[in-house]
Image (cartoon, rainbow, N blue to C red):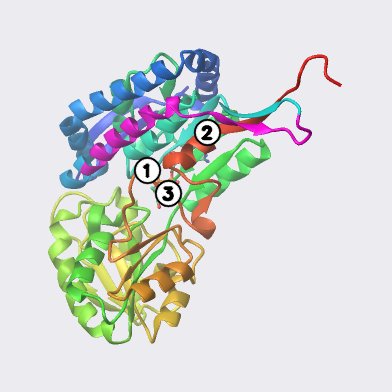
Amino acid sequence: MSATVRSFNPANPADLVIEVPAPGAFGAAAAVERARAAQPGWLAAGAAARSAALGRAAEAVEAHAEELAALAGREVGKPLGEARGEVARTVAILRYYAQAPYAASGAVHETAAGQGLLLTRRRPYGVAGLITPWNFPFAIPVWKAAPALAVGNTVALKPAPEATACALRLAELLALPEDVLTVLPGGAEEGAAVVSAADIVSFTGSTGTGQAVIRTATERSVPVQAEMGGLNAAIVLPDADIEQAAAQLAFAIAGYAGQKCTATSRVIAVGDALEPLRAALGKALAAAGADSGPVISEAARERLTGAIASAVEGSAELLAGGQLPQRDGWFIEPTLLARVPAGHPLLAEEFFGPVAVLLGAADLDEAIALANATRHNLSASVHTRELDVALAAADRLDAGMIRINAPSSGVDFHLPFGGAKAASYGSREQGQAALDFYTASRTVSLLPAGGA
Ligand code: NAD
């Protein structure tokens, strides 16, 4: 008997957004088999057909942008402005990859001996098993599915249970041929079944789950990429425009209630930047409060309040927030803490909420050492007017994405996306990197018939 997947509105937990049956492990494996059977036809349909399908998908998503943004607001608590931005990005990703089927799929090389020709050709793997989180319920499924489909794979998408309605509506709008893109509602059971059956795996989610997915896929010797949690740092130099930095940091800490893998959770003020930044950031976070949205669940909020309480019981000083607003839903005020005791979990783990720690550093060297003192370096930001300082910091920071005078969250949709150390495994997502990931290279030697 299959279980049921249900998702609730985090701003109004009494609102059941969707309830659907989950296929279970057996049903998920069967869906991957159907996707495998559909793959040769999808590849054989040709570049024009795949390009047109992705182009039509972009039109459909764009035509339903307001509906989708509202659904993300209801199901995963995304503020409307951010939800609209995510839908626009989804459309842009589809348009970008709609061009990809026409790109060269290989190259011609000289043979070493001089006779004949060598061809390299890139070919799809078969079924791409995509496992996605709830926080970008349209953009992440599409930034995986669109390149996979463009190059001729079919897709089995296992969305996070919290974003089930978004995934099912997205798939309706994409309107691809039967079994070319299948959404499998469910949780760990269906996810594990997809990872155990797909020909190539792309995962985004928390670090622990990602590591389990990597283990299973590598044991099966199928290609796998995983984008996981971040513990991202922002470095503010004394010469920075402190008001601008505070506004950008408030967005990076509190935007979408801190539930972006690229959110800032550690702010490192260098030297004389500390005092003005304390004041400016505290004020900016207090102002950000109402707009940042709820966190995804009661459990997520309890984990945050527990961490804040234990830090304050230690030596920490509460510079902003820390309270639960008097309203329905899983809201928590954007929070800034200073003097958090060394070794506290807030300095070591991703909490995925609107909470950040302010640290002081004597100079840039100490700031870089603090920023790099984690294995979860996804993105980082540096705030300074000095170009040489910015470039030196960008060189020395362990992070996949480094942003100068900009929030740590956000990167253009056509550039490689991914982290450093334990934040990321395998090749990058987005842009050309994704097209390379979803294809394998084969070398074809063409020699003259009857040659020596
Ligand atoms: P999660 O790890 O709980 O779940 C992610 C997905 O994995 C879901 O679809 C889930 O059902 C599935 N899953 C769970 N157990 C599984 C298993 N054993 N095998 C296969 N699949 C399994 O993460 P979440 O709460 O949905 O998302 C939040 C996390 O995602 C945060 O840690 C955040 O940093 C991370 N994230 C990372 C990026 C990035 O690009 N680095 C982007 C967005 C979110």
Q: Position of residue 390 (x, y in %)?
A: 36, 71
In what quadrant of the picture does the C terminus appear? top right
Residue drawn at 46 percent across, 29 percent down: 103
Q: Quadrant of ligand 1?
A: top left
Q: Earlier in the sequence, mark 3 or mark 2?
A: 3
* Badge 1 density bin: few <14, some 14–19, many ≥20, Cα 10 Å: some
Q: Position of residue 91 (x, y in %)?
A: 27, 33
Tell me the magenta residue range: 85-114
Q: Is mark 3 within 8 Å of ligand 1?
A: yes
How far apart, in angstroms, are the residues tagged by discs 3 and 2? 15 Å
Q: Nearer the viewer, residue 362 or 318?
A: 362
Q: Are marks 1 and 3 in contact (CB under 8 Å)?
A: no
How far apart, in angstroms, are the residues tagged by discs 1 and 2? 16 Å
Amino acid beneath label 2: Tyr
Label 3: state its secondary structure. Answer: loop
The residue singled out by tag 1 in the image is: 414
The residue singled out by tag 2 in the image is: 438
Q: Position of residue 448 (x, y in %)?
A: 76, 18
Magenta run includes residue 96 = yes
* Badge 2 density bin: few <14, some 14–19, many ≥20, Cα 10 Å: many
Q: Nearer the viewer, residue 236 or 340?
A: 236
The answer to whether residue 435 is visible is yes
Q: Nearer the viewer, residue 113 or 61?
A: 113
Residue drawn at 33 percent across, 39 percent down: 139
The residue singled out by tag 3 in the image is: 417
Q: Is mark 2 within 8 Å of ligand 1?
A: no
Numbered circle sitting on residue 240 = none
Amino acid beneath label 1: His
Residue drawn at 42 percent across, 22 percent down: 181
